[in-house]
Amino acid sequence: MPGNPVMGRSLCLEVLFIMAKAVKYFSKGLSLFLIGGAGYILIENIWRGYSHITMFFAGGLSFLCIEIMDVRLGKTVGTFSKCILGSTIITTIEFIFGCIFNLYYKMNVWDYSHLPFNLFGQISLLFSVLWGLLTYPVLGVGKMVRKLLFRESEKKIRPAFRTYHF
């Protein structure tokens, strides 16, 4: 018994629509990753005069995660709270990368063991605070990228949580 040709066409169109949406999200994610990676390499070169390729990946992943957090939370969470969350994101990524590249592979990309309140020399309280301060301009850059590169407006971005006013 042959299938319904109209249903077959609509299924193909739906699959194409889903694929186009997936490509759009992938290209946005890749763009944010590349911008974050390049941005972090630039910041690190200005800060200490050199960088390492692993920092490109850490910076890209950090920027992408902060952007996802910012879009998902929208205006339901204030900027100060987003900076604390951004610091947590960056510090977590820094710890994971540090354990892999510095401790396991012994690449010695950075060492915070001389700083107080450090954990295995991979993260420190001082740098966690600095990452929180850095998150503020990163949020602004993210908004600018979404507006200029992706042509998104504040109204178009749907937050993860709805707020209800009584």
Image: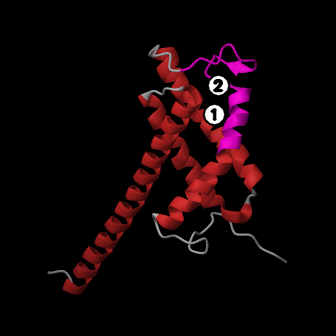
Q: Residue 67, image x and y in percent? A: 56, 53
Q: Is residue 85 left or right of residue 71?
A: right
The label on residue 72 is: none
Query: Which quarter of the figure is the C terminus placed in?
Result: bottom right
Residue at 52% over, 26% down: 49
What is the span of residues highlighted in magenta in the rendered image?
110-134
102 within the magenta span = no
Q: Residues within 10 Å of mark 2 (few under 14, many from 20)?
A: many
Rendered location of residue 154, percent (x, y): 61, 71
Mark 1: secondary structure: helix
Would you say residue 121 sits in the magenta stretch?
yes
Left or right of 166? Residue 22 is left
Which residue is pictured at 74% across the width and 58% down the height? 77
Along the line of sight, the residue nearer the viewer: 28 or 159? 28
Q: Amino acid at mark 1?
A: Thr
Q: Residue 91 got which mark? A: 1
